[in-house]
Image: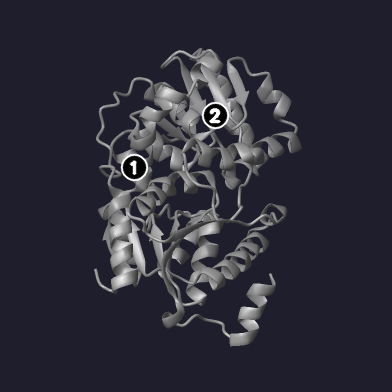
Amino acid sequence: MKKYNKLESQNHIKTLSQKILKRKIGLVVGTRPGIVMFSPIIRECKKRRINHFVIHAGQHYSANMDEDFFKDLKLDKPRYRLTNVRRYKLHGSQTARMIEGIEKILLKERPKILLVGGDANCNLAGALAARKLQIKVGHIEAGERSYDWRMPEEHNRVIIDHISDLLFTTNKKGKSNLRKDGARGKICITGNPIVDAAYQNKDIAYLRSRVLEKFGLQPEEYFVMTTHREENVDNRANLLGILNGIRKVACDLNKTIIFTIHPRTRTRLKKFRLYDFVKKIPNVKIIQPVGYLDFIRLITYAKLIMTDSGGVQQESCILGVPCITFRDNTEWTETLDIGANRLCGTNSEAIFKNAKDMLRKKNDWKNPFGSGDAAKKIISLTSKYAFEEVI
């Protein structure tokens, strides 16, 4: 702490001169999808021996959701981890703590560029901290839009895109959205590194994970469910609608539903006195969040995925597993266009109908998120832009 204060007091700075920035790349993670997304990015930096460092912003930290992911993926522990963020529940206070913590790290490390990925608060915090210090910002998964202004993630996406220097889009749709919004950064279509992660780790998961054996599951004889979105789990009516929907699915379709329960969701279920309700639903098995390799194996061999997660929508599509989504809209409209995903909101009848329909869906779609070389493209473009000033 003294070191950061000394730096600020000696130089009286609010921004960093380009002359004192170092030839290195900063990477920000803070949630499970962020760790997964950045795993191939980190590997690519190591492969090329690029000076880099990882900040874990601590947004959703827990051992089995974060630390175990680094172990599973054979990644070094982050050089920095913010430890006081989880105490703050409101968006403003949480984001403020992360901006403050990341800013201090950036003042110490002074990278040429900071990469953030996705739409979580930690990414907004990282982008704002870097922007204010005049450090360049690269946004992975730029240009995604749900056009649902109720969602905090939508606010974050738009703000990050408008303060980023490099905008890495999954495909042409993202580029078009950025053009419509008047984003000023350099737009680069690279594909999505979540594809790299899925391809790199699918075979490893098959060899190392024993999650199916642990829970007595047979391939394509079970469904996987996740839900954690604020608009769903913080609203009792919406959460009850989802639970009534999965009760009908579990009973009428007679399939085991593996419910990987997010800490936030468990807390809300208990607060709303719904935890015992879901525990009594036949064929529903509640499990703690699992490591990434276990999760990849779970969804790879599932018959159907039910979720409100953007990352899980992508992963199920990439791995060829039909999905229904507990939302009225999605930023990943490609999954709808190719028939890999259906939106069903939180209406119990819609959940049952769409689940039943998707069981008849052939998983013969083409993955729309890239060919698995996004990390190579992103790091090449980042290095050229930050270190050579040209693309």
Q: Quadrant of the C terminus?
A: bottom left
Residue 63 appears in the picture as rendered: yes
- Left or right of 93? Residue 246 is left
Residue 178 rendering spot, x and y as whole percentages:
33, 63
Q: Nearer the viewer, mark 2 or mark 1?
A: 1
- Out of 313 and 202, give the one closest to the viewer: 202
Q: Is residue 128 above or below residue 151?
A: below
Secondary structure found at label 1:
helix
Residue furthest toward the front?
Answer: 49
Residue 150 appears in the picture as rendered: no
Secondary structure found at label 2:
helix
Residue at the spot of label 2? 348
- Out of 163 and 277, give the one closest to the viewer: 163
Residue 74 rendering spot, x and y as whole percentages:
47, 39
- Left or right of 251? Residue 278 is right
Q: CA distance from mark 2 to mark 1?
A: 35 Å
Residue at the spot of label 1? 196
Colour scheme: one colour
At x 55%, y 17%, the residue is 214
Residue 10 rendering spot, x and y as whole percentages:
62, 86
Q: Earlier in the sequence, mark 2 or mark 1?
A: 1
The quarter of the picture where residue 362 lies is top left
Residue type marked 2: Ser
Residue type marked 1: Asp
Query: How busy is the neighbourhood of tag 2: few (under 14 within 10 Å), some, or many (20 plus)?
Result: many
Q: Is residue 349 above or below residue 198?
A: above
Residue 8 rendering spot, x and y as whole percentages:
62, 81
| Badge 2 vs badge 1, beta-carbon distance below 8 Å | no
Label for residue 355?
A: none
Q: How many marks?
A: 2
